[in-house]
Image (cartoon, helix red, strand yellow):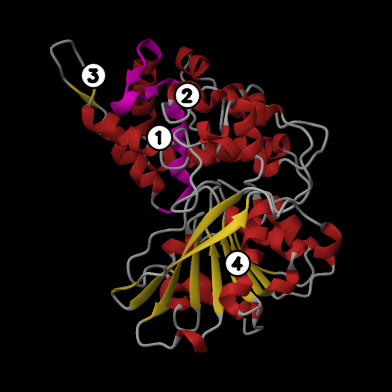
Amino acid sequence: MEHRYRQPGTVLTDHRFTVPLDHARPDGEQIELYAREVVGAGQDPDGLPWLLYLEGGPGFGARRFIGRQAWLERALTEYRVLLLDQRGTGRSTPADRQTLPLRGGPAEQAAYLAHFRADSIVRDAEAIRPALTGGAPWTVLGQSFGGFCTTRYLGAAPEGLTAALVTGGLPSLTATAEEVYAAAYPRMERKTLAHYARYPMDVERARRIAAHLAERPAELPGGHRLTVEGFQSLGILLGSGDGSHQLHYLLEDAFVPTPAGPALSDGFLEEVRSLLSFAGHPLYALLHEAIYAQDPVAPTGWAADRVRARHPRFDAAGTLAGEEPLLFTAESIHPWHFTTDPALAPLREAAGLLAARTGWEPLYDPARLAANEVPVAAAVYHDDLYVDTAHSLETARAIRGLRTWVTDEFEHDGVRAGGPRVLDRLLALVRDRA
């Protein structure tokens, strides 16, 4: 049953679809997808073409906009927008510590989760498209991991696309997970040092917090255990436009005086918990390396952890023994995440099996992308913390007809922080108006 309701300047409609868990077995187990349609108030939806939005992640449901926020303001001038909760996220059939035990043990959970990568998400989109568009192709806007899915779409089902728009999400077509992280750690260091250049007082603050946690890891509300490595992972903030400022304000309020001496404040610990917990998006941790897996023989094998060991400047113990600034990390998932976060701890064995899994299929088709005929444009951020710029530009050259907008005006969240401007620029590019 569809529900239709209103927000400021918009009319929203809920949609639900049933799709196969494994599209190679269409008569097998089915899962549910949820999507929210958004149309500008006063517009006739039947006269508008569709734009499908694929959120970043993996593991995040489509953003819950209120009214005509961010890029929606521009999109709603000419599109009927579909905000898809990708499989396992949002209001689609959930996949988390509470529901995955329904699958069975860790082996069954890992086998189930192997169906939650970009290839399955694109097949989901193609399965629901005829019911919405009557079979007509649609425009796809992919943010971050949504751009990975869009790149898959271009190679796997270009007949379903009128145009493709990517923001901060052109993946390498060939890089292994290890190669992705080998490129990532130098970016993490650059972003950390840029933060300290802006806020030099944070060098000592970060070292003081790390030293405190090295002696006594903190118990956060809800049972989360904060270690030095967990604290370092707050560097994920540095990939957004205002993230450096957020991190600064967080660090300056870390300690309070107590009868037993200085302690990390309840307010600090609660904010850290909200930033680091995977309770709302466990698939991000479970599948983060699997989204790069394309080698049928080699497992990802906790690639981020292996690569980190080759970058001793990120070792907090070594840093605290000397005088160097503490380096923050960002989009990297490690085995310790599955022991310190209560939302992930029950899934530790399944995560290990995914890390050891072989038989992954290639996600991208370089030959079809080289012959691409779909108009496609991508915003590439010049030193994106989350997606390597060099990898993105290499892929841009490999996709026939793709036009790039390389900019240092925004960080990874440009499509949101930039309001209508980013989407407007990409639409101009695919229409040869820029």
User: Picture coordinates of residue 68 (x, y %)?
Assistant: 36, 72
Label whose residue precedes the other's in the sequence (4 or 1): 4
Q: CA distance from mark 3 to mark 1?
A: 21 Å
Residue type, mark 1 in image: Ser
- Relative to 316, say whether 215 is above or below: above
Q: Which residue is mark 3?
A: 263
Q: Residue at x 44, y 79 (%)?
A: 76
Residue type, mark 4 in image: Ile
Q: CA distance from mark 4 to mark 2?
A: 42 Å
Label whose residue precedes the other's in the sequence (4 or 3): 4
Circle 4 sits in a helix, a strand or a loop, which is it?
A: helix
Left or right relative to 283: residue 258:
left
Q: Which residue is mark 2?
A: 229
Residue type, mark 2 in image: Glu
Along the viewing direction, whichever of 174 and 6 lies nearer the viewer: 6
Q: Residue at x 68, y 73 (%)?
A: 161
* Residue 285 shows up from this direction: yes
Along the viewing direction, whichever of 391 and 267 lies nearer the viewer: 267
Q: Is residue 49 magenta?
A: no
Q: Which circle, 4 or 3, is nearer the viewer? A: 4
Pointer 4 with pointer 2, Cβ within 8 A: no
Label whose residue precedes the other's in the sequence (3 or 2): 2
Along the viewing direction, whichever of 416 and 380 lies nearer the viewer: 416
Q: Which residue is mark 4?
A: 128
When asked about the image quadrant of residue 200, the answer is top left
Pointer 3 with pointer 1, Cβ within 8 A: no
Chain part drawn in magenta: 214-241
Q: Which circle, 4 or 1, is nearer the viewer? A: 4
User: Picture coordinates of residue 261 (x, y %)?
Assistant: 19, 13
